[in-house]
Amino acid sequence: MSSSVGTYPPQQGHAETDQELYQRFTNLVSSWPCFSSFFASQLYRHENGWHASLAPMVGTMVADACFTVRPSDIVVATLPKSGTTWIKALLYSTVHRREYPADSSDHPFNSLGPHECIKFFEYQLYTQNMIPDLNDLPDPRLFATHVPFVSLPRSVVLASSCKIVYVCRDPKDHLISLWSFANKFRIKEGLEPLSIEAAADFFCDGLTPFGPYWDHVLGYWRAHLAHPEQVLFFRYEEMSRDPAAHVRRLAEFVGHPFSMEEEEDGVVDAIVKLCSFDHMTGLEATKDGKTELVIGAVDNSSFFRRGVVADWKNHLSPEMAKKIDAITEAKFRGSGFPV
Ligand code: PPS
């Protein structure tokens, strides 16, 4: 697979420290155009055309420069508010089902949220001026990212056997989920909540974290078409319709298919139930736990809201929905992406 990751060479004749590497990327990102958006922090526009706030964009670039992939690695890729928490839970519980049966009373999800079980490169691993040592993690290592395909760590893109699991969501539900999440933060920080009209305008202008939405989806869609054995492509709406079928496809894709015996024992259904919205929201780790991200400690409960399809109908005017649909149709035309 190819991506057009840029290179940002250090100055010659000097062994760069980790802190200097972060500083070099911070200086570079700070020189790029920046925009107001959903959250208090500004979004920068990466030279590959996507947007993020400073720390995760710098983390992305450090991961690109420093992460060394293993062929057995599995990377979850999503836009924020597209089903990340759910697919992380499904992947973790599927891959680790032998050590941690989904119906066991001491499953890790009782004490850890899915974001602590599978960590983001740019929000958790490549942060705070540090380069993590990931060598001791057992195979298969599970990672996550919100970064568009074009800016994935180059070693992930070049490794032909590393697997990428992508989930996309209807743009209007993605927008509503992001808007609701952002307003919780805005209120906590003493800012006015964003109106849905303002949020929809930012969204249509591509000014969302890791957006434009359409470029993100198309990047992974094209990678999936070109390399279906390396990039799995799921849709939140289809997962909601038939979660068990998606768990089976996921297990096959990552090389851990369910045996006949597991099927007969109901292992697939147990995983679906463990990771269901209703079960996850009742866990102590969700109700009381937090996840340390580069933006601060985030309540695990904030990763769960309604977990339904087409909630946008309760928030978007028909005109706003029509405008988003028209942009989506135009952007996806000719891509083979089923709208
Ligand atoms: S994040 O912050 O990027 O990790 O958020 P992300 O997990 O991508 O998206 C949050 C939305 O996903 C819903 N959610 C779920 N849906 C179904 N099943 C499960 N287990 C689940 N967990 C989280 C969550 O409610 C958010 O969607 P909305 O529409 O806001 O309810």
Image (tube, rainbow, N blue to C red):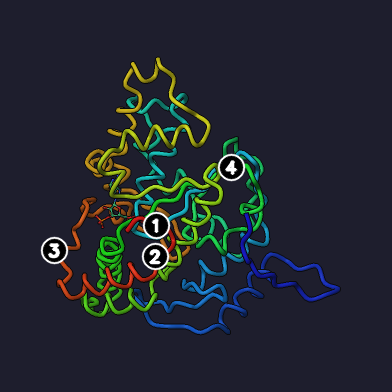
Kindly identify which residue carries mark 3.
314
Query: Mark 3, mark 1: which one is toward the viewer?
Result: 1
Kindly identify which residue carries mark 2.
332
Label whose residue precedes the other's in the sequence (4 or 2) = 4
144 or 119: nearer the viewer: 144
Q: Residues within 10 Å of mark 1 (few under 14, many from 20)?
A: some
Query: Contact (CB < 8 A) between labels 4 and 2?
Result: no
Q: CA distance from mark 2 to mark 1?
A: 6 Å
Label whose residue precedes the other's in the sequence (3 or 1) = 3
Q: Quadrant of residue 251?
A: top left
Q: Which element type, helix, strand or loop, lies under badge 2?
A: helix
* Residue 243 vertical position relative to residue 234 in the rendered view, above or below: above
Q: Which element type, helix, strand or loop, lies under badge 1?
A: loop
Q: Residues within 10 Å of mark 3 (few under 14, many from 20)?
A: few
Amino acid, disc 3: Asn
Kindly identify which residue carries mark 4.
73
Write the residue at 51% across / 84% down: 33
Q: CA distance from mark 4 to mark 2?
A: 30 Å
- Counting from the top left corner in percent of width and height, residue 275 is at 31, 38
The numbered dot on residue 337 is 1
Query: Contact (CB < 8 A) between labels 2 and 1?
Result: yes
- Quadrant where the image shows the C terminus: bottom left
229 or 186: nearer the viewer: 229
Q: Which element type, helix, strand or loop, lies under badge 3?
A: helix
Q: Is mark 1 within 8 Å of ligand 1?
A: no
Q: Is mark 2 within 8 Å of ligand 1?
A: no
